[in-house]
Image (spheres, grey):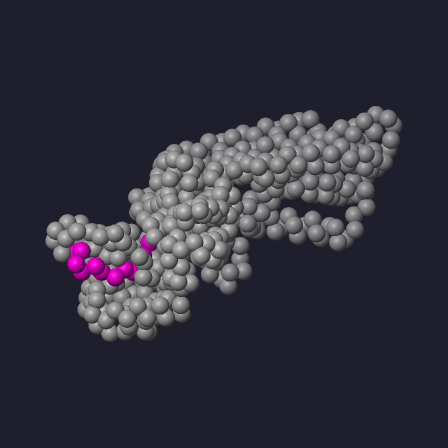
Amino acid sequence: MIHFESWKIWTILMISLWGLLYAAPNLSPQEWRDKAGDISGILPHKTISLGLDLQGGAHLLLQADMDYAVTARVEDLEQALRRSFARERIGHAAMRALANPAAGEYGVAYRLRNMDDRDRAYRLTRNLHEGIDVRISPDGTARATLNAQALTEIKTRTLNQSIEIVRRRIDETGTREPVIQRQGHDRILVQLPGVDNPERIKELLVRTASMTLHLVDEEASQPGARIPPGTVVYPQLGNPDATLAVLRRVALHGERLIDAQPSFDEGTPIVQFRFDQTGAREFCTITRENVGRRFAWVLDGEIVTAPVINTAICGGSGIITGRFTIQETVDTSLLMRAGALPAPLIFVEERTVGPSLGADSVEAGKIASIMGLSFVLIFMVLVYGLFGIFASVALLINIMLIFAVLSTLQATLTLPGIAGIVLTIGMAVDANVLIFERIREELRNGRSVISAVDTGYGQAMSSIIDAQVTTLIAALLLFSFGTGPIKGFAVTLWIGIMTSMFSAIWLTRLMVVTWLKQRKPKVLPI
């Protein structure tokens, strides 16, 4: 234990130097960090990001409307079944989508005109969706309902899609280090550190950005006209008093969009869009078969524009015009690029943490860390003398290593994370205390200086490993089953334990061994 190979010495020195270099940017002015990042990106310039509770920002809890999502799904199933029956020439009547949230019943109902088609109708209905139960009565009445497993899958997929789209929208705004997590079966937690305008973020998040294309029902659009089944009335964007009746059936879904960008047309803000290959082909077919009719672009339940189709449009791209402001074209393009939410989102909780409150938390964390560090250093020096000084130097390097690792990982530091660091400060000298006490015991038993040090490090190692591994397991469980702040605490605790093992077992021992070889003392000052 006394002998140190050259490679070990160099490894310890390089790790310590690395910790110093990569922790330093956290104490450097912003302009220095920017310059360091500009020099080929070689010099360390990354810093720890502060969490919501330390720098302020917005805390939002959103809930997805699962009834809407499932209802929209069964309406799609109804349309798909209509097309399948038409293709197979199966006569039917009274086909409708079933959506009864109170009873938990979702599916499709219809009545067969000819019972000879029963087997084909059953097969087509059964293949509509995995997990659909089909019952056809002797009189031809049929009910196809989604079972509990199918409903759970739809809701899970809806929430996962919503989380991904929320993430895309927030990333498009340039927000750094957002926290986006699932909570329960229908809620999404969003934390936005440093956001000073949460209202715009909220507006972007709750908009479904569902763009669909419908053919206009000209007769039903006349004032006082009766609205027939299969037709729906939407208000026009910017003018809610003006309405237009369109066919309920969606001619083309906005999910076929692959790009949308704000632009100008003769000085007027517009939105340019482009379809994928399938969307371009469908758009070409629709415009070719409906020349002379109006085509309504519906965004979030409002008609943006309803131009007349003068000719077939087969290029796969186009523009949306309307009473847009420049900011509206930017936001609309952003939403269309990010994709449509599969279900509306509702705010169920909102908190805003001010920068001053975050600054107070940072200051309190600094005071707690400095006090904890000071008490530990004083205790070690008073109790263990020179060896306590060695342990204190190792502790300072240990703290630098923690900050270096967090900076390299671009981790977000929260108040519980600071608590983990403060706890680590106390735990970091635990291994040294075990070693030093074992050395004292060996000296009392009559061993020589070299033998006492060698035996002390050797015999204390099992106790140190047991204690640290036990704490690592606890930190791992906290990270695995905890959320948000709990994970932050677990991460800093885990990193702190690993760096303290290095500082106590390697770094402190190197300092002790180097001193022993140079001074060759007869008595240990411990």
Residue 420 in view, yes or no: yes
Residue at image x 69%, y 49%? 12
Is 268 displayed left or right of 5 in the figure? left
Residue 113 is inside the magenta segment: no
Span highlighted in magenta in the image: 210-221
Residue 213 is inside the magenta segment: yes
Residue 275 sits in quarter: bottom left
Is 312 displayed left or right of 75 in the figure? left
Task: Locate the N terminus by quadrant.
Answer: top right
Residue at image x 62%, y 36%? 477
Residue 489 sits in quarter: top right
Residue at image x 51%, y 51%? 130
Is 272 displayed left or right of 268 in the figure? right
**Residue 372 vs residue 325, the one in the foreground:** 325
Residue reaching furthest to the left: 223
Residue 189 in view, yes or no: no
147 versus 336 height, above or below: above
Residue at image x 25%, y 69%? 290
**Residue 351 vs residue 288, the one in the foreground:** 288
